[in-house]
Amino acid sequence: MPHPAQPERGAALILVLLVTIVLFVIVSQVQHSAKMDLMIARNEQVWAQATESSRGAIEQAKQSLAEDLLDSISGGPLGGEGGGDNPFGGGDGGGDAGGEAGQGEDSGEPPLDHNQESWAREGDLDSQVEDMEILVRIEPENAKLNIIGMLAPEPYGELCEDQFVRLLIAFRADTGHDLSPGDASTIAKKLREYMTERRSKGKGEMPATALKSMVPPPEVEEGADGEEGEQPGDQPPPPNSGEMPDPYADEVLHLPLTLDELTVIDGIDESLLYDFEDSREIVPGLSNFVTVYSALNLDSELSARININFARRAVLEAIVPEDLTEMAEEIEEFRLNPPPAEWLEEEEQRKEQEQEQADQSGEIIEEEEEEEEEIEFPYFRDLGDLKFIESFADASENVLPEELRNAFLATIAVHSNVFSIHVKIIDQRKGLRRFARAVVFRTSTEGGSVRILPIIPFEWRKDPKLLLFPKEEPRDDWDEFENFDSFFR
């Protein structure tokens, strides 16, 4: 008699298949997790290497700036405007070669700075670490217009505001993204209001916050004409006293700590501040022409003089007398053309005098290599070299009155003491790039030591700085960089 059919027949096969599927899913998940962990580890390695490479490049740039100042001190600096320790409070010194140092704590004076120096030459600080290319550019902030000057006492504040309007009109001229005089005036007005009217204006609005950058405006003491002058109770609280100015007061100023802060102002956004590309053409950003870091003393005239050895064309057009706009072009041509014969003769005489002084003092001056002796482009050694600028040297009293001439000379210099160090890291294996920046203040003491003081020690940036790094930008894999940047956020 046949046995009845067993319902369990084939169950073992099904069970084996189920176990196989479960094991396959588990193994696949483990494999996927392992790949993700490996990818994360590699990205973290790239991130760590980029961070350390950027910080190392910044330290190398600081060392280059310090060595430049030490060389100037040992060789006898040409003098210049005062500086001291505080980048926001210069002294009264300055002007032509041999000027006395300002009344800062250390009475340090910036050296002559020009684009022939090692820290200023493109590529001298670049390096390669394995698959990472490290590009370094040092940008003197003293070559830009300090917008905080709009808060200085009149007529200096009004002069700075007028220069800022002229700069806004000029910095994107002929790019298709230029600003009209009306738009430029509106932006300047809103910027001034932002710095002077940071307070609550009624119910429903977010109250103003007491910021460290909020300071009372400078008090101007009246003369002996019977009017009430500055009173002891009107003085701002001393540093570190724990007291803050009243953010609701009508006379509280707000000094922007960075240019990024300006994007909260209507009419100023990232497309105005930063470089971008349009039809394969670089459209410069406002951050290349203005600053908030260079020295400034609100209690008197501007001490944030502009270094004409580095100032860009738009900055020059903004600061030259309005009746001599051709000066900007002549200054730029002077820096880009071979040096005049008279300039070379004066350089030879200067070197001979240095050698004679060294011989008298028993010092030894090392001879420079031949390739370094030849000067390809001239630079302004002091403000006396403006004699090579024809429109300025030949200007009559009617065109350039003495008062206007002196006012212009008071806004320019040939020295720098505040620098932005820009670093671009390119991972050649993955095609990724990162941008970093530090802002430093350079000064020296009477004892001859050099100090590099951080204003911004280190920060990652998204601004590609196309004017400083034009060869590598733009890239087709920019979106990949953005994803890489977001991943690590």
Image (cartoon, rainbow, N blue to C red):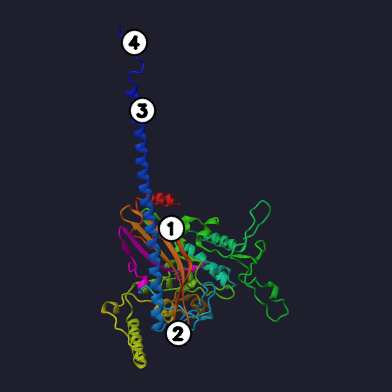
Quadrant of the rendered image containing residue 464: bottom left
Residues under numbered marks 1 and 4 in contact, where contact means CB atoms less than 8 Å apart: no
Q: Which residue is mark 3?
A: 18
Q: Amino acid at mark 1?
A: Asp
CA separation, marks 3 and 4? Answer: 27 Å
Residue 9 locus on image (x, y percent):
33, 18
Residue 15 seen anywhere in this rendered image of the structure: yes
Circle 1 Cα neighbour tier, 10 Å, few/some/many (<14 / 14–19 / ≥20): some
Q: Which residue is mark 2?
A: 98
Residues under numbered marks 2 and 1 in contact, where contact means CB atoms less than 8 Å apart: no
Q: Which residue is mark 4?
A: 4
| Element carrying mark 3 | helix
| Element carrying mark 2 | loop
Mark sitting earlier along the chain (1/4): 4
Mark closer to the observer (3, 4): 4
Q: Amino acid at mark 3?
A: Leu
Q: Which residue is mark 1?
A: 463
Does residue 457 sit above or below 357 in this rendering? above
CA separation, marks 1 and 3? Answer: 55 Å
Mark sitting earlier along the chain (2/1): 2
Mark sitting earlier along the chain (2/4): 4
Q: Amino acid at mark 4?
A: Pro
Mark sitting earlier along the chain (3/4): 4
Stretch in magenta: 118-146
Mark sitting earlier along the chain (3/2): 3
